[in-house]
Image: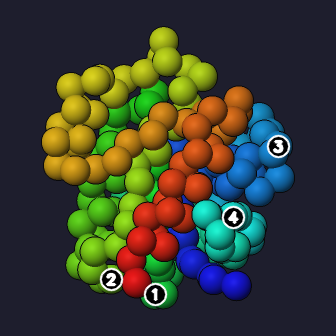
Amino acid sequence: MIKKKICMLGSFAVGKTSLVRQFVDSIFSEKYHTSIGVKIDKKVVRVDDSEVNLILWDIHGEDEFQKIQASYLTGTSGYFLVIDGTRSNTLAVAKELNQFTLNHIGSVPFIVLINKADLLSDWEIIDEELDLLKEKGWELIKTSAKTGEGVEEAFKQLANKMLEIK
């Protein structure tokens, strides 16, 4: 069986843990729990004729007080940059994390998840900002950890991208 490590990267409280919970266990909790360090989960997905064991590294949120350790990225096959659509500052953090990741492990597949699609009326991130990311070649998927919108699609799409690279 093929094994692939995926890192969940983003600012604090963007929904990284909730996205993993929704993907792995199909559950959502309104209670917020700050991630400390890293929590690892696994889920097997089928990509074409292959079974892929995804090892999901849910890494603590990045902020001015807590930076991600480069060692967490070792062996990463792909990653998600998670943005909270209701907090525009999380986009800047995602851009910094993307550069940090490029500097430490080089170019590997990634997808930007704009989370909290169930709260579109509260979004601070505007379409023009998202269009600029698309122009840079970044793949974007709107997700909701609460409703499950886009979650399964995102993980399968990243698995596909990782398998394309030999």
Q: Earlier in the sequence, mark 4 or mark 3?
A: 3
In the picture, the quarter occupied by the N terminus is bottom right
Cβ atoms at labels 2 and 3 below 8 Å apart = no
Could you tell me if residue 158 is visible in this image?
yes
> Which residue sits at x=46%, y=45%?
113
- Residue of label 3: 27
Q: Earlier in the sequence, mark 2 or mark 4?
A: 4
Cβ atoms at labels 1 and 2 below 8 Å apart = yes
Callout 4 environment at 10 Å: few (<14), some (14 to 19), or many (20+)? few
Cβ atoms at labels 4 and 1 below 8 Å apart = no
Q: What amino acid is labelled 2 in the image?
A: Ile
Q: CA distance from mark 2 to mark 4?
A: 26 Å
Q: Earlier in the sequence, mark 1 or mark 2?
A: 1
Q: What amino acid is labelled 4 in the image?
A: Arg
Front position among marks 2 and 4: 4
- Residue of label 4: 46
Q: CA distance from mark 3 to mark 1?
A: 29 Å
Cβ atoms at labels 3 and 1 below 8 Å apart = no
> Which residue sits at x=27%, y=80%?
106
